[in-house]
């Protein structure tokens, strides 16, 4: 007989008056954070003892942080308060129940119908040890394929079937009261995912966003009010034990969630109630936007992009004279009302699609950070197939003992597409902090203290060449 099928029968002998238990939740509110935490607010009706007494609040999250518990009586907030609190998470299982039976009387029935009575003094996965006849005899009973029933006595208040908060409470009035409990739990999080569908000429996109709420707290939240907080909330790192897609044409509020600024973050509230089961991923639409203007951006950054200036001397290292590189492709759009958006976009993954006849095909994905309204969104599509870049160093001059040097480059953009493209060649001027571009065939834009970009237009099926010289002084 498989030991997993052994029946463990417990006869509960009530040795004391059982503590008052909470009724079913009347209202639950969840505020879910992106870092894996959730604030649970649970309102229930409870029958409280007048004066001082014990009550138990069952069915809290298994991943609760007991140090965050906030208790309040909505019926008598001034006269009802907690004196002591315990978090009981030693949940009942067959072996945990046997541990509680140690030192108590048990009755064991084997498959052949034989009954053994005595005090359970030891057990493991293979056998049970029982003291019989006032301790004068010891019987060892094999467990696998042999034991059918074990009957024992256990005080009901020592058995915990659900994660439970046990309180010593003081209540001036007692009686039926509405109790609100709030606490923080881990292993519940949410994330945002975006789908952007590009039109044929890649000048417009339709944007849809969904949120995915993942609940692994060990508790189901029925008909809960759901809030999602977007932002990076500071927390003290502490290890805690763990117990076993029609689009909108205008920038209106998200149809699924209502957004509002909250402290330094954004809070998204679902205007209806929803049920989130334990060990469930639930997806809910966050927002939609139609016909968002966008542009495609090509960027060539040569492989020396990682070098930076260090120390008090110019970087004199010699690098390869020629660098071939791939051209990165980005899709950019403005998160503003003029672009049919203008709503806070939580951090998340953006997947790009493009229509091919009646089918939409995946063409790239990227992650965006939290983006306020009126800010630029830039999503990496991938590498250009038909656009190739090459960077050649054509000259390097530094006279012995001189406090300057000059370096010249030639950038070639070969466009094999049947339409023109503009590639922004990004140059990191890393050798020294004081630099001047003394000669250039194209205009450039300064991005930061040591970075410039040259827009280079290459006509269809042709090559464009840009040259420049930079001088460093120290």
Image (cartoon, grey):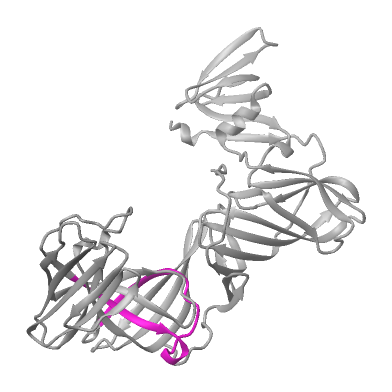
- x then y, percent, for residue 236: 58, 50
Q: Quadrant of the C terminus?
A: bottom left
Q: Quadrant of the N terminus?
A: top left
Q: Quadrant of residue 107?
A: top right
Residue occupying image coordinates x 14% and y 88%: 419
Q: Is residue 246 visible?
A: no
Q: Is residue 205 visible?
A: yes
Residue occupying image coordinates x 66% and y 29%: 152
Residue situated in front as seen by the camera: 369 or 213: 369
94, above or below 102, in the image: below
- x then y, percent, for residue 224: 62, 67
Residue occupying image coordinates x 19% and y 83%: 442
229, above or below 272, in the image: above
- x then y, percent, for residue 260: 60, 77
Residue situated in front as seen by the camera: 279 or 119: 279
Q: How many marks?
A: 0
* Left/right of residue 425 with respect to residue 190 in the rendered view: left
56, above or below 292, in the image: above
Q: Quadrant of residue 404?
A: bottom left
Residue situated in front as seen by the camera: 151 or 279: 279
Q: Is residue 309 magenta?
A: no
For this orientation, the residue located farthest to the left is: 462
277, above or below 379, in the image: above
Q: Which residues are magenta?
A: 327-354
* Left/right of residue 82 with respect to residue 350 in the rendered view: right
For this orientation, the residue located farthest to the top is: 136
* Left/right of residue 67 with respect to residue 200 in the rendered view: right
- x then y, percent, for residue 175: 88, 57
Residue situated in front as seen by the camera: 461 or 110: 461
Q: Quadrant of residue 269?
A: bottom right
């Amino acid at each position: 007989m498989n030991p997993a099928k052994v029946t463990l029968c417990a006869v509960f002998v009530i040795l004391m008056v059982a503590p008052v238990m909470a009724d079913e939740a009347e209202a639950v509110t969840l505020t879910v954070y992106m870092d894996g935490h959730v604030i649970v607010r649970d309102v229930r009706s409870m029958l409280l003892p007048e004066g001082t007494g014990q009550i138990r609040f069952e069915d809290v999250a298994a991943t609760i942080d007991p140090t965050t518990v906030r208790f309040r009586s909505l019926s008598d907030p001034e006269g009802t308060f907690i004196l002591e609190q315990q978090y009981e998470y030693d949940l009942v299982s067959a072996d945990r129940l046997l541990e509680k039976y140690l030192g108590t009387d048990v009755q064991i029935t084997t498959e052949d119908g034989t009954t053994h009575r005595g005090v359970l003094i030891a057990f493991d996965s293979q056998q049970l040890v029982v003291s019989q006849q006032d301790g004068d005899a010891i019987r060892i009973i094999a467990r696998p394929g042999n034991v059918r029933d074990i009957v024992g006595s256990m005080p009901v208040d020592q058995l915990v079937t659900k994660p439970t908060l046990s309180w010593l409470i003081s209540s001036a009035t007692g009686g039926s009261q509405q109790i609100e409990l709030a606490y923080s739990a881990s292993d519940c999080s949410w994330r945002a995912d975006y789908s952007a569908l590009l039109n044929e000429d890649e000048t417009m996109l339709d944007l849809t966003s969904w949120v995915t709420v993942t609940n692994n707290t060990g508790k189901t939240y029925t008909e809960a009010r759901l809030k999602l907080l977007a932002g990076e909330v500071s927390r003290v790192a502490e290890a805690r034990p763990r117990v076993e897609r029609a689009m909108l044409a205008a920038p209106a509020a998200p149809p699924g969630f209502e957004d509002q600024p909250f402290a330094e973050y954004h809070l998204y509230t679902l205007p209806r109630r929803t049920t989130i089961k334990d060990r469930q991923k639930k997806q809910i639409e966050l927002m939609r936007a139609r016909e968002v203007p966008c542009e495609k951006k090509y960027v060539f950054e040569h492989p020396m992009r990682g070098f930076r200036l260090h120390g008090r001397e110019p970087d004199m290292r010699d690098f390869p004279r020629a660098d071939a590189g791939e051209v990165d492709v980005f899709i950019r759009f403005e998160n503003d009302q003029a672009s049919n958006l203008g709503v806070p976009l939580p951090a998340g993954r953006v997947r790009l699609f493009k229509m091919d006849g009646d089918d939409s095909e995946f063409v790239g994905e990227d992650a965006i950070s939290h983006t306020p309204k009126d800010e630029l969104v830039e999503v990496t599509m991938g590498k250009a197939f038909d656009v190739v870049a090459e960077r050649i160093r054509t000259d390097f001059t530094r006279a012995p003992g001189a406090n300057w040097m000059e370096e010249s480059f030639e950038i070639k953009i070969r466009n094999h597409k049947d339409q023109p493209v503009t590639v922004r060649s990004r140059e990191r001027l890393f050798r020294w902090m004081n630099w001047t571009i003394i000669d250039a065939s194209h205009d450039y834009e300064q991005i930061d203290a040591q970075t410039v970009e040259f827009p280079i237009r290459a006509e269809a099926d042709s090559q464009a060449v840009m040259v420049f010289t930079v001088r460093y002084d120290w």
